[in-house]
Amino acid sequence: QVQLVESGGGLVQAGGSLRLSCAASGRIKRINTMGWYRQTPGKQRELVATITAGGSTNYAASVKGRFTISRDNTKNTVYLQMNSLKPEDTAVYYCNARLVVEMYEYQYWGQGTQVTVSS
């Protein structure tokens, strides 16, 4: 069974930092692009950042310069370092990964972790 397990969310004051982690486990042949998305009540899930297997990154304009995505391929883990957090960063953050299982690529989601930034 393949799963993504997230950790690292919580409550922080504006200007503070948090680091999210997401570990993939199971019968995985290869991990392609990994990423983080976020969602607030009543809104669609939005992209925060992605990172390819080769390390190329992409960020939403709202987080560029404040957030850093990275991955450790030896641990099947992706990280999101969030600095200079703002109240508008408050959301449930979801890990996403495109994993090759057996012969095919599938998209998987983590269970979500709450990030709350107080003003």
Image (spheres, helix red, strand yellow):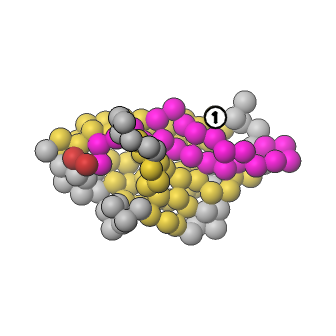
Name which residue lies at 46% across and 44% down. Answer: 45
Name the amino acid, label 1. Gln
Residue topped by disc 1: 3
User: Taking the image as drawn, is residue 8 in sight?
Assistant: no
Question: Residue 101: x, y in percent?
Answer: 78, 43
Please report the bounds of the magenta region as a residue range: 89-112
Question: What secondary structure is the magenta-colored segment mainly?
Answer: strand
- Quick check: 10 above or below 13? above
Work out whether residue 14 or residue 77 is closer to the camera in this orientation and state it: 14
Residue 94 position in % (x across, y down) = 48, 41
Looking at the image, which residue is at 46% across and 35% down? 112
- Which element is circle 1 on? strand
Is 101 contained in the magenta span? yes
Q: Quadrant of residue 13?
A: top left
Whether residue 19 is visible: yes
Q: Where residue 80 sits in the image (x, y, percent)?
A: 43, 53
Which x, y percent locates residue 92? 39, 38
For this orientation, the residue located farthest to the right is 103
**Residue 59 or 18: which is nearer the viewer?**
59
Which image quadrant: the N terminus?
A: top right
Q: Residue at x 52, y 59 (%)?
A: 50
